[in-house]
Amino acid sequence: MLTTLIVMSYMELLRGKEETLLRIIHPNVLLLALLTEHDMLDECTEQAIAAERTNFDRNRRLLDWLKHSPLEAFDGFLQALRTNGQEHVANYIDGAPGKRGGRQYFILRG
């Protein structure tokens, strides 16, 4: 299998996968608490996300926050997903631990 190597910023990566992410992330209380506990998400933003009526709307707000956050927040988000039992979502975002569709993604840092 031929592997295509793609280098992109995390914002480009999120934009390209946003449609699916809006449907598959489970923005539960534990996920938001993990982000807040590790000082990636402030309490006001956590409450605003949690107050949305549907998972889709919570995910839209969560992804909007993430797209405007530093790279450390993106890394923390992936770790929080994995800690929260959403490894499949983290793997979909960053292509780890394996390759998806013949592509391996590397996040452009700095």
Image (cartoon, rainbow, N blue to C red):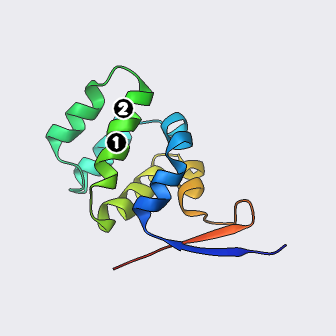
Task: Say if 6 sits above or below 26 in the image.
Answer: below
Residue 99 is drawn in which quadrant? bottom right
Residue position for label 1:
62
Left or right for 96, reference 31: right
Which corner quadrant of the image does residue 104 belong to?
Answer: bottom right
| Above or below, comparing residue 17 to residue 7 in the picture | above
| Kind of residue sitting beneath label 2 | Arg
Q: Residue at x 31, y 60 (%)?
A: 73
Q: Is 83 left, or right, of 41 in this rendering?
A: right
Does the residue at mark 1 contact the one at mark 2 (Cβ under 8 Å)?
yes
Residue 42, how many percent across, how many down?
17, 47
Q: Residue furthest right?
A: 1
Which quadrant holds the C terminus?
A: bottom left
Q: Position of residue 105 (x, y in %)?
A: 58, 69
Q: Which residue: 85% across, 72% down?
A: 1
- Kind of residue indicated by mark 1: Leu
Q: Tell me if I can see residue 73 in this picture.
A: yes
Which residue is found at the position 31% from the left and 66% from the top? Answer: 72
Label number found at residue 58: 2
Q: Element at badge 1?
A: helix
Q: Decide: few, some or many residues near mark 2? Use Cα within 10 Å; few <14, some 14-19, many ≥20.
A: many
Q: Residues within 10 Å of mark 1 (few under 14, many from 20)?
A: many
Note whether residue 82 is visible: no
Q: Is residue 12 above or below residue 1?
A: above
Name the residue: 43% across, 28% down.
55
Observer-nearest of 23 and 13: 13
**Residue nearest the viewer, comparing 59 with 68:** 68
Between the C-alphas of marks 1 and 2, the distance is 6 Å
Query: At which x and y percent is residue 16?
Result: 52, 53
